Amino acid sequence: MTTNDMRGHIIAAYGGKEDWRKKVQKMSDAQVLAIYRSLQAKKKVK
């Protein structure tokens, strides 16, 4: 899975709000990975 795929999952997990979408798109790959792993641990993404 690429970081762009992870970004899509993160955006979807938070309802896809435009403000959040913009923030996620600007995040570093490391931040995206950290948030994605956190959501995985909470079972909010696959």
Image (tube, helix red, strand yellow):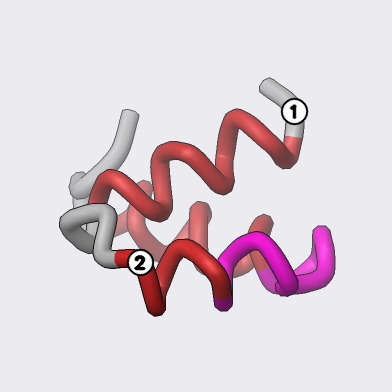
Residue 29 is one of the magenta-drawn residues: yes
Q: Is residue 46 left or right of residue 14?
A: right
Q: Is residue 23 left or right of residue 28?
A: left
Do the residues bearing badges 2 and 1 touch, measured as CB atoms within 8 Å? no
Which is more foreground, mark 2 or mark 1?
A: 2
The magenta stretch is 23-31
Q: Observer-nearest residue: 27 or 44?
A: 27
Badge 2 or badge 1: first in the primary sequence: 1
Kind of element beneath mark 2: helix
Q: Residue furthest top?
A: 1
Residue 14 is one of the magenta-drawn residues: no
- Where the N terminus falls, by quadrant? top right
Q: Residues within 10 Å of mark 2 (few under 14, many from 20)?
A: few
Kind of element beneath mark 1: loop
**Label placed on residue 22:** none
The quadrant holding residue 38 is: bottom left
Magenta-highlighted stretch: main secondary structure? helix
Q: Observer-nearest residue: 19 or 13?
A: 19
The location of residue 20, given as percent across then percent down, is 40, 73
Q: Which residue is mark 1?
A: 2
**Distance CA(mark 2)–CA(mark 1):** 21 Å
The quadrant holding residue 12 is: top left
The location of residue 46, given as percent across then percent down, is 33, 29
Residue 39 sits above or below residue 31 on the image:
above
Q: In the rendered structure, which amino acid carries the disc numbered 2? A: Glu
Q: Is residue 30 left or right of residue 19?
A: right
Q: Residue furthest front?
A: 18
Residue 20 sits above or below residue 33 on the image:
below
Q: Is residue 10 left or right of residue 35?
A: left
The location of residue 11, given as percent across then percent down, is 38, 53
Q: Which residue is mark 2?
A: 18
